[in-house]
Amino acid sequence: MDLARLDRVLAERGEPSYRARQVWEWTARGARSYDEITTLPKALRAELSEAAPFSTLAVETERQARDGTVKALFRTYDGHAVEAVLMRYRDGRRSVCLSSQSGCPLTCTFCATGRMRFGRNLTESEILDQVLHFRRAEPVNHVVYMGMGEPFLNLDAVLASARRLPDVGVTHRRTTVSTVGWMPGLRRFVDDVDEPIRLALSLHAADPELRSELMPVNARYPLDDVLAECRRYVTLRRRKVFVEYVLLAGVNDSPPQARALAALLDPASFKVNLIPYNPTGSYAGSSRDTIERFKSVLDKARLPATVRLTRGRDIEAACGQLASAPRGTARQVR
């Protein structure tokens, strides 16, 4: 829902200011259309349906994985592709992975999104409409900004959307924003965000030279500077930073590389999420034994580390796999 447009339409019709709040409250609770918002006069519901569409995104396809994960492909009003994912867990978590851009300009070599043609930043409303799409089907309680794009290249819209998430049922403490280390946005996030929104860093190599090969952004914003800013976040917020580390066979998964990672990160400030590589055609994933050996090195160094559950791999919905097909080629719901 284009909330700015809704405000304009209501103002032009001379409606009281509380009408916009009524619409948002119902929408955040899962209303599927204006017709369900019974606190609005029936005539106004009909007018709004014409003048302010209920969603800024059109659903093109939706697919469900064997593990219950759901991936939706949306189109913006100007035809840009956006994907978002709902992950269902046995413990009751319902986590939505949101995109902040259509495509991504930062071209990390292991990420399918980086091979897409970059479209544009998404608006606050386009980001919110991703989570609202899934909220209409069932309650959600976690959000991660880890889909398409670099959130800190679109920080204003990301924060504006995140600040509305408690209305949808997602507290700030259950909201995580991930970055590859885009320093201008990271500094602003550390300095200006008062809410307890969590920070995650995509790291993937402790060696600066290797990290620059995997993630060209490292040549612009060196890892030492990024980590210093992350430590400042920990000092100010008293919350650990999650470190995302995708394991690539024969590239960054050896025990010496695990020791280098453990030497780089202070256990009091960082927690590592080891991510099995999800095939995108660029690399091979590390074996289960290799992942366990890597984790054992971190365990011995007492650096907190977990191996992330892989969700939705069979529908290309897992970490690093979001890269929408051209219009008309995406597969349908199965």
Image (cartoon, rainbow, N blue to C red):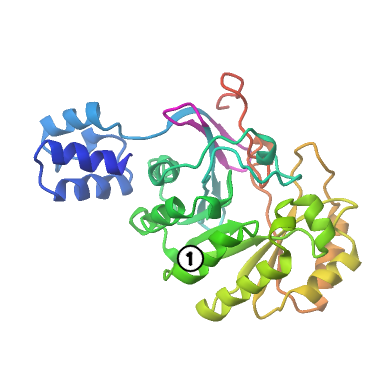
Q: Is residue 66 magenta?
A: yes
At 80% from the left edge and 69% from the top edge, which residue is drawn? Answer: 261
Q: Is residue 123 magenta?
A: no
Q: Give, as a single range, the part of the protein colored magenta.
A: 62-80
Task: Determine whether, in the image, residue 159 is placed left or right of residue 199.
Answer: left
Q: Identify the residue position indicated by label 1 in the image.
A: 197
User: Compared to 60, does 305 lie above or below?
Assistant: below
Task: Determine whether, in the image, residue 205 is placed left or right of residue 318.
Answer: right
Query: SS at mark 1?
Result: loop
At 43% from the left edge and 64% from the top edge, which residue is drawn? Answer: 172
Residue 159 visible within the image: yes
The quarter of the displayed image where residue 226 is located? bottom right
Q: Residue 294: horizontal and vertical position, in percent?
A: 84, 64
Task: Determine whether, in the image, residue 61 is placed left or right of residue 137.
Answer: right
Q: Nearer the viewer, residue 261 or 89?
A: 261
Residue 247 visible within the image: no
Determine crowd level at label 1: few under 14, some 14-19, many 20+ residues with C-alpha closer than 10 A. some
